[in-house]
Amino acid sequence: MKKILFSLIGFLTITGCVFAYNAYNNLSSEQCVAGRGCCSSHGGVCGCQNGRSRCCDGTLSPSCQCFRDDVKGFEI
């Protein structure tokens, strides 16, 4: 009985550590991508205007383009 209990505790400890490590790494990698993306310092992308990404603060991105996706019927 003790072997089963210790095995279960060990498994749960290792699983918890792996989950926490993966959650931390996914969060930090998303933050890095967001920091380099279109409109990253202007609140993100909220639309498309004249072929340029429109940032959420109303400015147009000088470097990011957008276009209409005819298959899905919306601008990306």
Image: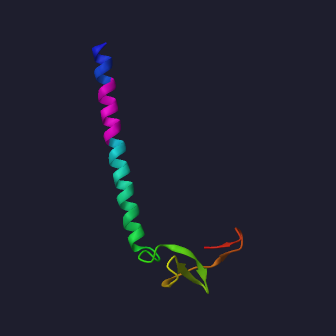
Q: Which residue is drawn at 31% across and 19% down?
A: 5
Residue 18: x %, y % from top left: 34, 42
Q: Does the magenta stretch include residue 15?
A: yes
The quadrant in which residue 70 appears is bottom right
Residue 22: x %, y % from top left: 36, 49
Position of residue 22 relative to residue 30, above or below, is: above
Q: Which residue is drawn at 44% across and 73% down?
A: 37
Position of residue 74 relative to residue 23, above or below, is: below
Residue 63: x %, y % from top left: 48, 84
Residue 67: x %, y % from top left: 62, 79
Q: Does the magenta stretch include residue 12?
A: yes
User: Please, what is the dominant secondary structure of the magenta stretch?
Assistant: helix
Position of residue 35 relative to residue 18, above or below, is: below
- Residue 40 left/right relative to 74: left
Q: In which quarter of the image is the N terminus?
A: top left
Position of residue 49 relative to residue 4, above or below, is: below
Q: Residue at x 48, y 73 (%)?
A: 44
Instruction: Please tell me which residue lies in front, 42 or 35.
Output: 42
Q: Residue at x 35, y 59 (%)?
A: 28
The quadrant in which residue 72 appears is bottom right
Instruction: Please tell me which residue lies in front, 14 or 52.
Output: 52
Query: What colour scheme governs how the chains and residues are painted in the rendered image of this protein?
Result: rainbow
Where does the magenta region start and end? 8-17
- Residue 18 left/right relative to 50: left
Instruction: Please tell me which residue lies in front, 41 or 6.
Output: 41
